[in-house]
C-alpha cells in the first residue's frame, strides 16, 4: 500500500468526473427506458403491456402494431409493449409485486395465489356472452368459483414430430404405444442421429403427459392423485429412453425450436404447433406428427394443450382502461386474433368461430394437428401451481435420471404436493 | 475473521494522536462531529437500510406467510422454518453445497499454489504466463457458462469434449444432463476452476515473492537439495497465513455458488435447475422468485447465512486465523 | 539445471492451453454461422469468417444488447467510484476523527461483513422492492454501493497516514473535511485505483442481484441479457457468442491496462479478507 504518489490524484479526479457523467446518464435514462411506446405524446394514460417472447419472426412487430392501432382509435390511451424473453414467469411475478408492474400481461394459468394477491381481476363483464364460444380447457385454467380472470389469446398444441424419411428408412411405423416409442427410438439411433428429443434435460416434454397417457390425472379437484402404479410404470418405461442411449440431450437449442429435427440430430422430437411453418419451409414433406403415445390398458394418446391468456393486473391504476383495451384486442377484434394465431407460427384461436374460419388450419399437417387436438387435447387445472408441481417435477427427475423407486418417490412427492395444495387459498 | 483483522489494524496505529484526543474528549468538538457525521453518514445510512432493515424485515417475513407478496402481517410462527427443514430437497441442497465445497476448495487450492510456484520459477515470459492464468478472472460466470454449456461440454458430437471423446472412440456424452453417474460435476467444477484459479494464484505468488531469498540459501547450505524439500520445509510453512486466508475465501465463495449452476443447469423456460445441481442459493431463488414464497425464501436466507457464519467462525477458531504471529 | 528449466516451461505451456482454449472457442464461435455452429462435426476454424453474429446480436430487438451494455456501463461506472469514495470517506473519519461515536459506528459497519451479500438476496429484494426499486436503475446500483470491507481497508490505510501532513494542513487552516479532500484523498491514489478497478470488475460481472431486481428487459445488464439468451425461445448461437465477446472486451482491456492495480487490489482484499 505505497499509494502516496501525488500524481495519482488525477485519477481520483477522473473518478469523480466519471461519477458526474454517470449521474447525468442515470437521470437521462430513467425517464423512458425502452422507447417502445406506441407514440402519442398527449396520451393521458399509458398502459404497460407485457408479452413473453414469441419465437416466431414478426410477432413483436405485430404486438406493437396492435398497440399503435389502439392508440390511433383511442388517442387518450398509449400502450407500451414490453417483450420479455427467457424466464418470463419469474419476471412478471416479481414485477407485479411492485406498484409499477405491468397493467396487462399474459399467463398460462391463474393460480389461487394470484387471485388472492390481486394480481388479476375478474373479466366476466368484458367476456360476456362470448364465454360459450371459448375453449373450455383454456377457460378452466383461468376460472375460480365461477369467475373468469383471463381472456384466452391462443391455444398451443404440443405433440411429437417425426422425420418421415428416417422412419421409413428404418421401416418403422409411427409409434402408438410408449413401448413402441422406446423401441423406435432405439432403432432410429444411428451414427450422429439420436432417436428422440424431449428437451435438453431429457424430461421437459414427457413430464406433463405421462399421467394423461395412462388415462389418469395429476389432480382431482383439490387432491393430488399422481402416485398411482400406472403412472409409476409409465415413468419406469420412459426411463428406458433416457438410459438406452437413444435420447438427444444437451443439444444447443431447446425443444420449442425445431432445429434438432431439421439438422437431423434427432428422428423424433417433442414440439409445438407453432413450429409447423418453419418445418414446412425447411423439410417440406419429410415430417409427420403424432400424439404422445398411450401406455397401459386404459391408456390413451395425449396432446397437451397449452397457450397464453391475457389478464389485467388487479393493482393496476387503470383497470378500466386496461379492460377496455383487452376487450378490443382479444374479444372484439377477430382480425387481430387470426393474425396473432396464424400469421407467424401456427396456434389455434381459442374462439370456436374464429378457429373454424382459419384457412391455414384446414389442410395438411395443421389439419391433423387440430384433429388430434380436438380428440385428445387435455391440460391441468389452475390448481397445478408452481409449488404444487415442484415435488412432482423433482420426483420425475429422480425416477428417470437416477433410477429412484418410482412408487415410493411418487408417494412421497404426492404428500408434499398435497401440502402445497392445502396451502393454496380458497378463492 | 473481519473483527480480528479490524482490531489488529487498530493496534498497528503507532502515530494516531491518542494523547491529544484524550485531552480533547472533555468538551464536545463540534466541527469534528460535523465532519465525522458528514463523512460516515452515507455508508451508515446505506448499511442501515440495505443490511439492517433488510435483515430485520426478512427476519419478520420469515415468520409470516408471504406468498405473492412482500408485505408483513400474516403471522404463522415458525411454520416456514418447519416446512424448510421438512423438505428433503433443502437438505439435499445443503449437503450438495458441503460436498461441492469439499471438492472445489482443495482442488482450487492445489492448482493455484502449483501454478504460483511454477510462474515464480519462470524467469523469462513470467508476465505472459501470469496473465494467461489470471485473465479468466475477467470473464463473468455467465460467459463462462455459455462457453461450457454450448461449446465445450454440449451434448452434440461437435462439442470439444465429445470431439475429443470421439478421437478416443467414445460415443458422444450428454455431460450436463447425466446425473447418474454425476458427469455434470465435471462441468461445474471445471468452470469454477477456470474462473477462480488465477485470482488465488496471484495471492500465492505475492506471498511467495515475499519470502526472503536468504532462507533458501541457508537451507541449501544445510543440505536441502531438491526443490521439493525446499518447498516443503520453507515455502509452504511460510505461506501458512496466506493459505488459511485463501481456504476461507474459497469456502465463503463456494457456499454462495449460484451463477454457474443457474446458467449451466437450468433448462428451457422453467427457470431454476432440477433437483440435481440445486445448491442452497438456487433453491432459494426458486422458492422466492419462482414459487413467489417470500416467507419461506427469507427463512432459507437466514439458515444459509447462519451456516456460513458458523463455518467461518469454526474455521477461524481452528486455524487461529487473523492473529498476528 | 537446464533440463529443469525446459521442464518448467513445458509445464507452463501445457497448463496454459486449457486456460486459453475457452477463449479460442469463444472467438471461433462468434465468427461462425448458425448453420456451421449447429452442425454435428468439429471445426477448427470457420471456412468463411462471418460477422453476422455480431450484427444479429445488436439487431435483436427482444434482448436489447446495446441497452444492456449501456446499463452495465452505467452500473459499473457509477458503482466503482462511488462505492470506493464512500468507503474512503468513512475510513478516514473512523481513523482520524476522534469522537465518541467512532467505535460504535465502526462496529456497526464491520458487523455487516459477517452477512454475505448473495446469501441474503431475498431480504434485500424485499426491502428494495417495497421501496419501489424493482425495474429501476437505482435499485440495480444503490444496494451495491456500501462496502464495509473497503471501509476497513481505508481505515487501516488512514491510520498510517502521516500525522505531519495532517498537522501541516491544520496550520493552513483546513478542517477535517479539508484535510480529507485536499490532502488525504489525493494521497490515496494507489488504494483508490486498486479498489476502484476491482469494484468495476465485480459490478460488471455481477449476475444474481441484477437478475433479481431487473425484471424488465429495459433494466437488464449485459450478464442478464446473455443469460436470457441462453434459454431464449429462439437461440441464435453466433449472436450469443458474439455478445459474449463484446461483453468480455471491456474487461479484458481493463485487465491488461490496469493489471498492476488489480494485482495490488487482489493482494490487499484477498489476504486481509
Image (spheres, coloured by chain):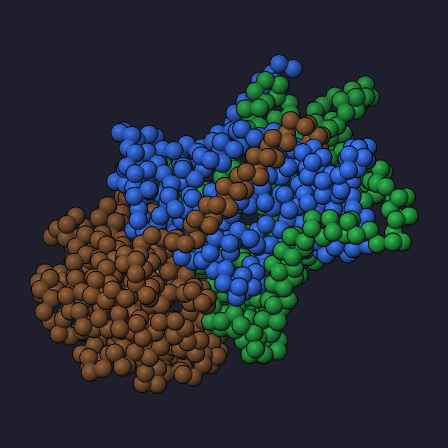
Chain colours: A brown, B green, C blue
Q: Is B65 rendered above or below residue B221?
A: below
> Which residue is at 14% across, 50% downward?
A281
Quadrant of res B281: bottom right
**Drawn side of residue A93 relative to residue A139, left or right:** right
Residue A116 position within the rendered picture, expressed as x and y whole percent measured from the top left: 43, 78
Name the residue furthest front: C173
Residue C124 position within the rendered picture, expressed as x and y whole percent measured from the top left: 57, 60
Closer-to-camera residue (A46/A180): A46
**Drawn side of residue C150 relative to residue C124, left or right:** right
Is residue A395 among the parts visible in the rendering? no
Quadrant in which the N terminus of chain C is drawn: top right
User: How many numbered marks, from 0 up?
Assistant: 0
Quadrant in which the C terminus of chain C is drawn: top right
> Which residue is at 35% across, 48% downward?
C64
**Drawn side of residue A116 relative to residue A142, left or right:** right
Closer-to-camera residue (B148/A165): B148
Quadrant of res B169: top left
Residue A302 position within the rendered picture, expressed as x and y whole percent measured from the top left: 25, 70
Name the residue furthest bottom: A145
> Which residue is at 36% across, 38% downward?
C242
Q: Is C48 rendered above or below residue B317?
A: above
Is residue C23 among the parts visible in the rendering? yes
Closer-to-camera residue (B67/B43): B43
> Which residue is at 63% across, 64% downward?
B53
Closer-to-camera residue (C259/A24): A24
Residue B40 position within the rendered picture, expressed as x and y whole percent measured from the top left: 70, 51
**Drawn side of residue B263 relative to residue C152, left or right:** left
Amino acid at each position: 500500500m505505497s499509494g502516496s504518489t501525488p500524481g495519482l490524484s488525477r485519477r481520483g479526479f477522473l473518478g469523480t468526473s466519471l461519477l458526474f457523467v454517470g449521474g447525468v446518464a442515470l437521470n437521462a435514462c430513467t425517464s423512458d427506458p425502452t422507447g417502445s411506446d406506441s407514440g402519442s405524446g398527449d396520451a393521458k394514460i399509458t398502459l404497460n403491456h407485457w408479452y413473453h417472447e414469441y419465437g416466431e419472426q414478426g410477432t413483436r412487430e405485430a404486438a406493437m402494431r396492435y398497440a399503435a392501432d389502439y392508440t390511433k382509435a383511442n388517442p387518450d390511451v398509449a400502450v407500451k409493449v414490453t417483450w420479455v424473453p427467457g424466464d418470463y414467469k419469474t419476471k412478471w411475478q416479481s414485477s407485479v409485486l411492485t406498484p409499477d408492474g405491468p397493467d396487462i400481461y399474459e399467463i398460462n394459468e391463474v393460480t389461487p395465489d394470484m387471485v388472492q394477491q390481486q394480481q388479476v381481476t375478474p373479466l366476466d363483464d368484458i367476456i360476456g356472452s362470448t364465454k360459450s364460444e371459448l375453449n373450455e380447457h383454456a377457460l378452466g385454467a383461468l376460472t375460480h368459483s365461477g369467475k373468469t380472470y383471463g381472456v384466452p389469446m391462443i391455444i398451443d398444441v404440443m405433440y411429437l414430430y417425426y422425420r418421415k424419411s428416417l422412419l421409413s428408412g428404418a421401416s418403422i411405423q409411427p409409434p402408438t404405444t410408449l413401448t413402441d416409442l422406446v423401441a423406435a427410438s432405439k432403432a432410429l439411433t444411428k451414427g450422429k442421429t439420436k432417436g428422440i428429443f424431449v428437451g435438453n434435460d431429457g424430461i421437459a416434454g414427457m413430464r406433463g403427459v405421462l399421467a394423461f397417457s395412462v388415462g389418469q390425472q395429476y389432480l382431482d379437484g383439490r387432491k393430488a392423485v399422481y402416485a398411482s402404479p400406472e403412472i409409476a410404470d409409465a415413468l419406469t418405461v420412459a426411463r428406458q429412453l433416457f438410459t438406452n442411449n437413444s435420447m438427444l440431450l444437451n443439444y444447443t437449442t431447446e425443444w420449442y425450436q425445431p432445429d434438432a429435427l431439421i439438422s437431423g440430430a434427432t428422428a423424433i422430437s417433442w414440439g409445438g404447433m407453432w413450429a409447423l411453418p418453419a418445418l414446412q419451409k425447411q423439410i417440406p414433406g419429410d415430417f409427420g406428427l403424432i400424439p404422445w403415445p398411450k401406455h397401459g390398458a386404459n391408456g390413451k394418446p395425449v396432446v397437451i394443450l397449452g397457450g397464453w391468456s391475457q389478464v389485467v393486473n388487479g393493482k393496476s391504476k387503470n383497470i378500466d382502461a386496461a379492460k377496455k383495451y383487452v376487450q378490443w384486442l382479444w374479444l372484439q377484434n377477430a382480425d387481430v386474433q387470426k393474425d396473432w394465431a396464424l400469421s407467424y407460427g401456427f396456434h389455434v384461436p381459442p374462439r370456436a368461430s374464429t378457429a373454424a374460419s382459419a384457412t391455414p388450419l384446414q389442410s395438411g399437417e395443421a389439419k391433423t394437428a387440430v384433429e388430434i387436438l380436438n380428440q385428445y387435447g387435455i391440460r391441468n387445472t389452475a390448481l397445478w401451481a408452481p409449488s404444487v408441481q415442484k415435488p412432482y417435477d423433482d420426483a420425475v427427475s429422480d425416477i428417470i435420471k437416477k433410477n429412484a423407486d418410482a412408487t415410493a418417490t411418487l408417494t412421497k412427492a404426492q404428500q408434499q404436493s398435497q401440502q402445497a395444495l392445502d396451502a393454496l387459498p380458497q378463492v | 475473521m473481519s473483527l480480528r483483522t479490524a482490531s489488529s489494524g487498530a493496534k498497528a496505529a503507532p502515530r494516531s494522536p491518542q494523547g491529544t484526543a484524550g485531552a480533547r474528549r472533555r468538551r464536545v468538538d463540534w466541527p469534528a462531529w460535523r465532519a465525522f457525521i458528514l463523512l460516515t453518514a452515507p455508508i451508515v445510512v446505506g448499511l442501515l437500510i440495505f443490511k439492517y432493515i433488510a435483515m430485520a424485515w426478512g427476519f419478520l417475513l420469515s415468520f409470516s406467510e408471504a406468498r405473492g407478496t412482500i408485505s408483513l402481517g400474516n403471522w404463522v410462527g415458525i411454520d416456514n422454518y418447519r416446512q424448510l427443514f421438512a423438505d428433503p430437497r433443502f437438505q439435499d441442497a445443503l449437503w450438495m453445497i458441503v460436498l461441492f465445497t469439499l471438492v472445489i476448495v482443495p482442488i482450487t487450492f492445489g492448482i493455484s499454489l502449483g501454478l504460483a510456484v511454477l510462474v515464480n520459477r519462470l524467469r523469462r515470459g513470467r508476465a505472459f504466463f501470469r496473465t494467461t492464468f489470471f485473465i479468466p478472472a475477467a470473464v463473468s460466470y455467465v460467459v463462462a457458462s455459455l462457453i461450457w454449456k454450448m461449446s465445450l461440454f454440449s451434448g452434440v458430437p461437435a462439442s470439444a469434449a465429445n470431439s475429443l471423446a470421439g478421437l478416443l472412440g467414445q460415443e458422444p456424452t450428454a455431460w450436463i444432463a447425466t446425473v447418474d453417474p454425476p458427469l455434470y460435476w465435471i462441468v461445474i467444477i471445471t468452470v469454477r476452476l477456470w474462473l477462480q484459479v488465477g485470482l488465488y494464484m496471484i495471492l500465492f505468488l505475492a506471498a511467495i515473492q515475499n519470502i526472503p531469498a536468504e532462507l533458501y540459501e541457508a537451507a541449501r547450505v544445510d543440505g536441502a537439495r531438491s526443490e521439493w524439500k525446499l518447498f516443503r520445509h520453507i515455502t509452504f510453512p511460510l505461506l501458512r497465513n496466506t493459505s488459511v486466508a485463501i481456504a476461507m475465501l474459497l469456502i465463503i465463495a463456494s457456499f454462495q455458488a449460484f451463477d454457474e449452476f443457474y446458467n449451466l443447469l437450468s433448462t428451457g423456460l422453467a427457470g431454476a435447475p432440477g433437483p440435481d445441481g440445486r445448491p442452497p442459493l438456487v433453491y432459494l431463488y426458486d422458492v422466492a422468485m419462482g414459487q413467489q414464497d417470500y416467507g419461506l425464501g427469507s427463512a432459507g436466507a437466514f439458515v444459509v447465512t447462519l451456516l456460513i457464519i458458523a463455518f467461518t467462525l469454526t474455521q477461524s477458531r481452528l486455524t487461529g486465523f487473523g492473529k498476528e504471529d | 539445471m537446464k533440463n529443469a528449466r525446459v521442464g518448467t516451461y513445458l509445464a507452463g505451456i501445457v497448463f496454459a492451453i486449457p486456460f486459453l482454449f475457452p477463449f479460442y472457442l469463444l472467438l471461433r464461435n462468434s465468427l461462425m454461422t448458425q448453420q456451421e455452429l449447429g452442425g454435428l462435426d468439429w471445426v477448427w476454424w470457420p471456412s468463411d469468417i462471418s460477422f453476422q453474429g455480431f450484427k444479429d446480436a445488436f439487431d435483436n430487438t427482444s434482448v436489447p444488447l446495446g441497452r444492456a451494455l449501456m446499463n452495465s456501463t452505467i452500473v459499473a461506472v457509477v458503482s466503482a467510484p462511488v462505492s470506493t469514495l464512500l468507503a474512503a470517506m468513512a475510513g478516514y473519519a473512523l481513523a482520524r476523527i476522534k469522537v465518541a461515536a467512532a467505535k460504535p459506528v465502526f462496529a456497526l459497519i464491520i458487523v455487516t461483513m459477517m452477512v454475505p451479500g448473495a446469501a441474503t438476496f431475498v431480504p434485500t429484494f424485499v426491502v428494495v422492492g417495497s421501496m419501489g426499486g424493482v425495474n429501476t436503475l437505482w435499485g440495480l446500483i444503490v444496494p451495491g454501493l456500501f462496502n464495509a470491507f473497503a471501509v476497513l481497508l481505508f481505515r487501516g490505510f488512514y491510520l498510517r497516514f502521516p500525522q505531519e501532513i495532517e498537522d501541516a494542513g491544520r496550520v493552513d487552516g483546513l478542517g477535517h473535511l479539508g484535510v480529507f479532500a485536499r490532502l488525504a484523498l489525493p494521497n490515496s491514489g494507489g488504494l483508490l485505483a486498486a479498489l476502484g478497478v476491482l469494484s468495476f470488475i465485480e459490478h460488471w460481472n455481477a449476475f444474481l442481484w441484477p437478475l433479481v431486481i431487473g425484471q424488465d428487459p429495459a433494466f437488464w445488464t449485459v450478464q442478464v441479457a446473455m443469460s436470457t439468451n441462453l434459454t431464449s425461445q429462439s437461440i441464435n448461437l453466433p449472436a450469443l457468442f458474439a455478445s459474449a465477446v463484446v461483453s468480455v472486451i471491456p474487461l479484458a482491456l481493463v485487465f491488461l491496462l490496469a493489471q498492476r492495480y488489480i494485482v495490488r487490489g487482489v493482494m490487499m482484499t484477498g489476504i486481509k479478507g
